[in-house]
């Protein structure tokens, strides 16, 4: 799978631009996902040709924050992405994930809820 970073709910133009500028030197494709596509699987949105599109259009609530999903990246590349984002001044992006064999079948809302729950658990324990 080709390296791609999916952006969800990056409504603040300046923050989106900082993220894009930070990742540009890494030559990773960046794909902004529209709310109407949230019922599709993460794998399909990342370009997995074995997964099909969903005909239905999502009309529910927007995500409660920005989410960034990295697909097709090695551990070293993920580290480069995270370092570039920290240096960019884009601010905090609390909801980040890597595409996995399990979550590639989840739709956007399901992945967001899982990441949000995990994020909240980590911050309660810490």
Image (cartoon, rainbow, N blue to C red):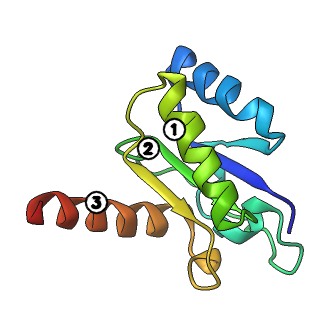
Q: Position of residue 53 (x, y in %)?
A: 78, 68
Vertical position of residue 14 compared to residue 99: above or below: above
The answer for how far apart the CA atoms under marks 1 and 3 are is 17 Å
State the residue in front, 89 or 124: 89
Q: Is residue 9 left or right of residue 55?
A: left
Location of the C terminus by quadrant is: bottom left
Mark 3 falls on what kind of element? helix
Mark 2 falls on what kind of element? loop
Are the residues flagged by discs 1 and 2 in contact, CB closer than 8 Å? yes
The answer for how far apart the CA atoms under marks 1 and 2 are is 7 Å
Q: Residues within 10 Å of mark 1 (few under 14, many from 20)?
A: some
Q: What residue is at 56 percent from the left and 77 percent from the top?
A: 103
Vertical position of residue 82 compared to residue 107: above or below: above
Q: Nearer the viewer, mark 2 or mark 3?
A: 3
Q: Residues within 10 Å of mark 3 (few under 14, many from 20)?
A: some
Question: Which badge, 2 or 3, comes first in the chain's sequence?
Answer: 2
Q: Position of residue 10 (x, y in %)?
A: 53, 32
Disc 2: which residue: 62
Disc 3: which residue: 119
Disc 1: which residue: 9
Vertical position of residue 123 compared to residue 51: above or below: above
């Amino acid at each position: 799978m080709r390296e791609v970073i999916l952006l969800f709910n990056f409504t603040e133009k300046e923050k989106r631009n900082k993220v894009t500028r930070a990742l540009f030197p890494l030559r990773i494709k960046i794909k902004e996902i529209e709310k109407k596509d949230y019922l599709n699987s993460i794998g399909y949105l990342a370009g997995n040709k074995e997964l099909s599109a969903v005909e239905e259009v999502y009309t529910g609530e927007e995500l409660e924050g920005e989410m960034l999903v990295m697909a097709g990246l090695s551990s070293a590349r993920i580290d480069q992405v995270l370092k570039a984002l920290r240096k960019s001044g884009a601010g905090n992006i609390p909801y980040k994930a890597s595409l996995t064999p399990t979550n590639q079948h989840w739709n956007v809302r399901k992945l967001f809820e899982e990441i949000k729950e995990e994020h909240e658990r980590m911050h309660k324990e810490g």
